Amino acid sequence: MSLSLVCLHGFTQNGQQLAGQLAAISARLPNDVELVCPDAPHDCAPASVRRLAEMFRMEPPPPPHRCWWDASDDGSEYRGWEVSREQLRALCDRPGRVGLLGFSQGAIAATAFAALHEHGQFPRLDFAILIAGRVPRAREFAPLLHAPLQLPSLHIWGERDTGAAQAAPALVEAFSAESRQVATWQGPHTVPQRGPAADAIVSWIERFS
C-alpha cells in the first residue's frame, strides 16, 4: 500500500524549501513513499519575516514567505486557519496511507490536524512527525486536546533550538505514551538531515510504508 507523507513547512518558509531540507531523508525512503510539500495559503507580513530572521540570527529565507495562519498577539486566535484547514483536508483525502510531517509552525498545524482526526473532523491519518513543535495555543483547539491523542507520533527537536527545547516536551505529553517516540539531536531550529534523529525519521516512516 502506498504512503503519502504530507509535509508542512515552517513560518516564512514554503514547500520547496522544506522539500530541500528533507532531500537527504527522502532519498533513503522506500519507493512507495510520496512526499507532498504544499505551500501554505497565506503570505507573511514583511515585518514578521524580518523579526523571525532576527530571532534566529539568520538571513531571511528566499521568497515566497508563506504561513498557515497569522496568530494574534496573545496566540489565542489563528487568523486564516480555516483556509489552511480546508486546503489540507482536501490534500489528505487520498487513497492509501497518509502521514503528516510538520516543522515549527507546520508541526503546530500537524498537531491541530491530528486532534481534528481524533474527533472525526479530518480525513484518516496514520501518524504524525512533529519537528520543533509546540502545543497549539488558539482557543478553539483546547477542547480537542483535553486527553492525549492516540495517533502514533514521533517528536524531534534540537538541543540548540532553545524555544523548541522548552516547548516540545509539553507537545509530547499531548500524545499517548503508548504510541509516541522522542528523538532529540544537537542541532538548531531546522530539520535534521543526518545522524540519529534523521535515522529515527526514516525508521518511523518505514514502519508505515
Image (cartoon, grey):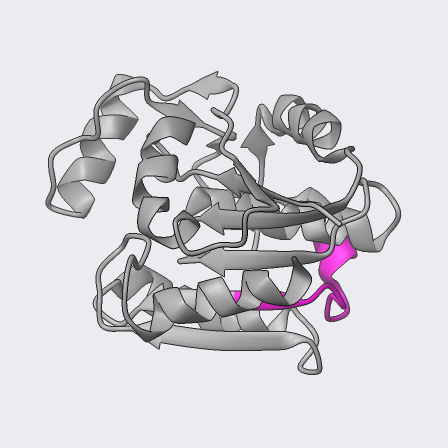
Query: Residue visible at 33% across and 53% down?
Result: 191
Of 207 and 42, nearer the camera is: 207
Residue 50 horizontal/vertical position (percent): 19, 29
Query: Residue visible at 61% across and 52% down?
Result: 111
Residue 162 horizontal/vertical position (percent): 26, 65
Residue 145 in which image quadrant? bottom right
Query: Residue visible at 27% across and 63% down?
Result: 194
* Relative to 7, residue 17 above or below: above
For residue 206, say whether it is visible.
yes
Magenta segment: does it hold 209? no
Determine the residue located farthest toward the front in the rendered image: 31
* Relative to 200, residue 82 above or below: above
Residue 117 horizontal/vertical position (percent): 79, 49
Query: Residue visible at 26% across and 62% down?
Result: 161
* Relative to 99, residue 167 above or below: below
* Relative to 105, residue 78 above or below: above
Q: Classify the position of the C terminus by image quarter.
A: bottom right
Over which residues does the magenta segment extend?
A: 141-154
Q: So how many labels did they put on this image? A: 0
For residue 14, say whether it is visible.
no
On the picture, is 53 further left or further right than 166? left
On the picture, is 23 further left or further right than 98? left
